[in-house]
């Protein structure tokens, strides 16, 4: 269900603002509405978060990898007390980071110098002597290998040194000739690159640079070792980061409030079932306050919060992946959950896969204790696994083995599966279509009920219930072919015609002229084709269930009937062959289960989103986001 909301207005003395916000943050009940006030209160808090975050990322490569398991717990006060020591640690890490960055810059600079000098290694002349004189132009640079010939023919004296794609070249010419030969030199691709302030021969500078680079690398290794020595303290930084994030969020909320020199005004949305708790928390802090709670006004952007039973809550994740319902409409979660549960099991349809999936999801929930969306999705998969255990018995297989084979020689040999989709596909398709029609009729009844609540009886009958009678009538027309009385088919025909006429005459009731009304009604009647397409969509239940069983059978055939059979008659290889085939079989089935589970999750959701929600669901709700503790590494007690 969608939780009713109240609009909260709170005024209290300014001195209690911080305490009240802390209390509201702890109970996670109020979403603030910005009053357009505030200043830069959160700038310093944001800076703390950024510094701690950067420090945590800096130490991450050196810290041990995080394993599975529940997050540690701490109080807000404990986390916030760790912020200042962690910031002092950040200062040390930032100093090391600056030195490492400086070291990297110096190393890169010298590496570039070394790379530029290596081609000149054979030149014995001191680099400081390579310069132009009063009468001679001397240029040191590089020329592409393909431009060497043109450079040599430019009329200048050219000395070539090392290099592969580019050669180091010393170009010498009289100054009075330079203007004449300069175009030829440039055309050859020559680029002048001097030696700057370097002195001594190229070989001497190369040796010096190599030593300096080696020293810088040694220094970097030492700095990295010093950084790695702080790795065990990354947990302190992460805990402080959560504490800083809590404080930042609270300080940001201050900017949402209006205030004077002596009082502040807070407005927001509060869950109706939390109003008493909010009042009690405020009264613990001060009895000098004004609190008003009112119903949302028309046009208010009211957030949506969902509240369902323990079994239904996990399926809120499926609803959220589509879109939250608009406030004041119908929550589709409890309405679609039973169908999702059944369809998932029918699609996966292998009892062993279901058992492994259910146990795996249960272990994940027990030992990692996730929260939020991850927890809900894991619980959806766990319940999907439970459904698969039973649906595999009714319609599927057991690790790719059919139930008659498993129960051979027992009283259950011809009992399970109730419908074998590989042997009787028509019956399975008919079952899937029937379940689809039931779900779509259910959606139509929900839409009709919503219309009645709004007082729109015409919408309930013409736009919704009429289709139930039309589709039912069309189905009844097939009665004679199924051996049922012909009168049933006749009754169905006239029922379909009668309600088709209702749609034709009244579906366009908003139009003022008769022609427009009839044209709208005729267009609406064309929706019968979409009903046919929607029913056919439920064939995906049959298709996915069949593919799971067939592929499982193929895997068993490949592993045991073909591969393992090749070891028979060779006793020395039988034991090793059994181990190899067992491991291979388990790996292939695990891969198949993972792929099938993903497909079942997506396609079961697709049936809800398109065929079910499409007939009544009003999406577009904005999630209720109260002021709360949003932490990454620690659960706040």
Image (cartoon, rainbow, N blue to C red):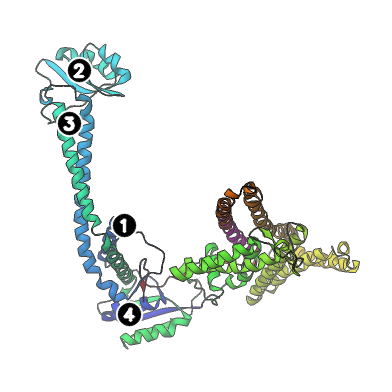
Q: Is residue 219 above or below residue 76?
A: above
Taking the spot 81% from the left edge, 63% from the top edge, the residue there is 474
Q: Earlier in the sequence, mark 4 or mark 1?
A: 4
Range drawn in magenta: 594-610
- Residue situated in front as seen by the camera: 254 or 260: 254
Label 1 and label 3: CA atoms lie apart by: 37 Å
Q: Do labels 3 and 2 touch, CB within 8 Å?
A: no
Residue 235's image quarter? bottom left
SS at mark 1? loop
SS at mark 3? helix
- Residue 89: image x %, image y %? 21, 63
Q: Which residue carries the number 3 mark?
A: 206
Q: Earlier in the sequence, mark 4 or mark 2?
A: 4
Label 4 and label 1: CA atoms lie apart by: 36 Å
- Residue 627: image x %, image y %? 38, 73
Q: Is residue 604 magenta?
A: yes
């Amino acid at each position: 269900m969608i939780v009713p909301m109240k609009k909260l207005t709170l005024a209290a003395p300014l001195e209690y603002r911080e305490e009240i916000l802390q209390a509201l943050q702890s109970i996670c009940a109020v979403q603030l509405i910005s009053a357009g006030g505030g200043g830069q209160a959160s700038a310093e808090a944001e800076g703390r978060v950024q510094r701690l975050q950067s420090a945590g990322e800096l130490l991450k490569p050196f810290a041990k990898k995080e394993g599975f398991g529940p997050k540690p717990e701490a109080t807000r006060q404990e986390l916030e007390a760790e912020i200042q020591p962690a910031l002092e640690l950040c200062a040390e890490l930032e100093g090391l980071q600056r030195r490492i960055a400086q070291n990297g810059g110096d190393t890169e600079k010298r590496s570039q110098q070394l790379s530029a000098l290596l081609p000149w290694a054979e030149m014995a002349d001191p680099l400081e002597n390579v310069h132009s004189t009063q009468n001679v132009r001397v240029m040191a640079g590089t020329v592409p290998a393909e431009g060497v010939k043109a450079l040599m023919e430019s009329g200048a004296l050219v000395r070539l040194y090392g290099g592969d794609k580019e050669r180091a070249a010393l170009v010498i010419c009289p100054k009075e000739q330079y203007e004449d030969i300069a175009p030829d030199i440039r055309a050859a691709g020559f680029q002048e690159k001097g030696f700057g302030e370097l002195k001594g021969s190229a070989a001497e500078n190369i040796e010096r640079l190599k030593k300096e680079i080696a020293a810088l690398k040694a220094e970097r290794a030492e700095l990295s070792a010093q950084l790695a020595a702080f790795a065990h303290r990354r947990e302190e930084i992460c805990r402080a980061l959560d504490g800083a994030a809590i404080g930042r969020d609270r300080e940001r909320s201050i900017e949402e409030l209006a205030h004077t020199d002596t009082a502040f005004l807070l407005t927001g949305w509060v869950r109706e079932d939390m109003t008493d708790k909010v009042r009690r928390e405020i009264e613990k802090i001060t009895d000098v306050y004004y609190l008003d709670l009112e119903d949302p006004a028309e046009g208010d952007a009211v957030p949506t919060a969902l509240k369902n039973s323990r079994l239904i809550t996990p399926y809120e994740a499926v609803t959220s992946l589509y879109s939250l319902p608009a406030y004041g409409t119908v929550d589709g979660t409890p309405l679609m959950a039973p169908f999702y549960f059944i369809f998932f099991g029918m699609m996966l349809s292998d009892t062993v896969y279901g058992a492994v999936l259910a146990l795996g999801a249960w272990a994940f929930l027990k030992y990692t204790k996730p929260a939020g969306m991850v927890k809900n999705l894991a619980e959806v998969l766990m319940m999907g696994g439970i459904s698969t255990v039973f649906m595999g018995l009714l319609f599927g297989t057991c690790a790719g083995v059919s139930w008659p084979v498993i129960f051979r020689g027992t009283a259950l040999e011809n009992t399970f599966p109730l419908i074998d989709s590989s042997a009787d596909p028509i019956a399975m398709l008919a079952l899937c279509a029937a379940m689809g029609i039931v779900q779509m009729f259910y959606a139509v009844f929900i839409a009709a009920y919503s219309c009645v609540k709004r007082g729109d009886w015409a919408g309930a009958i013409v736009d919704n219930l009429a289709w139930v009678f039309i589709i039912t009538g069309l189905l009844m027309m097939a009665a004679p072919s199924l051996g049922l009385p012909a009168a049933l088919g006749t009754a169905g025909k006239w029922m379909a015609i009668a309600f088709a006429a209702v749609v034709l005459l009244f579906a366009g009731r908003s139009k003022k002229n008769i022609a427009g009304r009839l044209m709208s009604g005729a267009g609406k009647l064309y929706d019968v084709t979409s009903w046919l397409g929607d029913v056919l969509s439920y064939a995906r239940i049959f298709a996915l269930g069949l593919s799971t069983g067939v592929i499982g059978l193929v895997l068993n055939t490949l592993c045991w009937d073909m591969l393992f059979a090749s070891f028979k008659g060779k006793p020395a290889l039988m034991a090793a062959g059994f181990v190899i085939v067992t491991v291979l079989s388990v790996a292939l089935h695990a891969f198949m289960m993972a792929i099938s589970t993903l497909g079942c999750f997506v396609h079961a959701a697709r049936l809800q989103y398109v065929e079910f929600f499409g007939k009544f669901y009003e999406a577009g709700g904005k999630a209720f986001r109260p002021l709360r503790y949003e932490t990454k590494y620690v659960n706040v007690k």
